[in-house]
Amino acid sequence: MAGKPFLSDIKTIRKRAREHMERGAVTDSYTLDSDTVVRLLNEALATEIICVLRYKAHFYMASGINAKSIAAEFLEHANEEQQHADQIAERITQLDGDPNFSPEGLQTRSHAEFIVPDDLAAMIEENLVAERIAIDSYREIINYVGDKDTTTKRLLEGILAMEEEHAEDMKTLMEQLGKKGEPAKPKQRKAKSK
């Protein structure tokens, strides 16, 4: 390693920068299959959009004695999931891809489901399940990109940290709800799956 230069010579870097300029930030040093990364990020985008929609539905449909504070938490999470979607869409464009916002096929692209139960405890549970799905999905994508795409890795690590906070928030709400007199475990009802 001692005899090998740390960077390519500046003339080579400058020459490479002028090649394939239409690819924007994707240079020849990007060694991953960008189409695969864009597909994975579009799945993550769909997951975030579904999470926004689910949290918003739960926000508006939450009812019960403890609903006001829990609904506020749902709204906060919906807004944060929207920020994640925006960050992911931006990264997709940086990789010369097209963010897929089409409602057609949204549910099948998403890793999480859109489920709106009738009671508050079941809403919390569905949100916790979705957060756990997102956590596992982001970990797998992070492991896939590794150090070959440090920008995507850092982005997803930040989102993953927030999803872990969301999961912990939902777990805490489930525990607290049971202590306040409403059932901590939801009744077995049919959920409305869209």
Image (cartoon, rainbow, N blue to C red):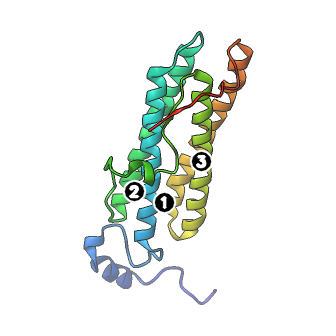
Q: Quadrant of residue 120?
A: top right
Q: Quadrant of residue 66?
A: top right
Q: Are there few (<14), some (14-19), or many (20+) residues within 10 Å of tag 3?
A: some
Q: Which mark is drawn over residue 133?
A: 3
Q: Tell which tag, 2 or 3, sits nearer the viewer.
A: 3
Q: In the picture, which quadrant includes the C terminus?
A: top left
- Please give the name of the residue rendered at 63% of the width and 37% of the height, measured from the top-left corner: 167
Give percent across and percent down for residue 155.
Answer: 50, 53
Helix or strand or loop: what does disc 2 sit on? helix
Residue occupying the far bottom of the picture: 3
Tag 3: residue type?
Answer: Ile
Tag 2: residue type?
Answer: Arg
Residue 130 vertical position relative to residue 182 in the rendered view, above or below: below
Q: CA distance from mark 2 to mark 1?
A: 7 Å
Tag 1: residue type?
Answer: Thr
Residue 112 vertical position relative to residue 43 in the rendered view, above or below: above
Give percent across and percent down for residue 117.
Answer: 54, 28
Q: Nearer the viewer, residue 123 or 5?
A: 123
Q: In the picture, which quadrant includes the N terminus?
A: bottom right
Q: CA distance from mark 2 to mark 3?
A: 21 Å
Q: Which is more N-terminal, label 1 or label 3?
A: 3
Kindly indicate whether the residue at mark 1 contacts the one at mark 2 (C-beta within 8 angstroms): yes
Q: Which is more N-terminal, label 3 or label 2?
A: 2
- Please give the name of the residue rendered at 59% of the width and 9% of the height, measured from the top-left corner: 65
Q: CA distance from mark 3 to mark 1?
A: 19 Å
Helix or strand or loop: what does disc 3 sit on? helix
Q: Tell which tag, 3 or 1, sits nearer the viewer.
A: 3
Q: Are there few (<14), some (14-19), or many (20+) residues within 10 Å of tag 2?
A: some
Helix or strand or loop: what does disc 1 sit on? helix
Query: Which residue is under mark 2?
Result: 91
Query: Which residue is under mark 1?
Result: 152
Kindly indicate whether the residue at mark 3 contacts the one at mark 2 (C-beta within 8 angstroms): no
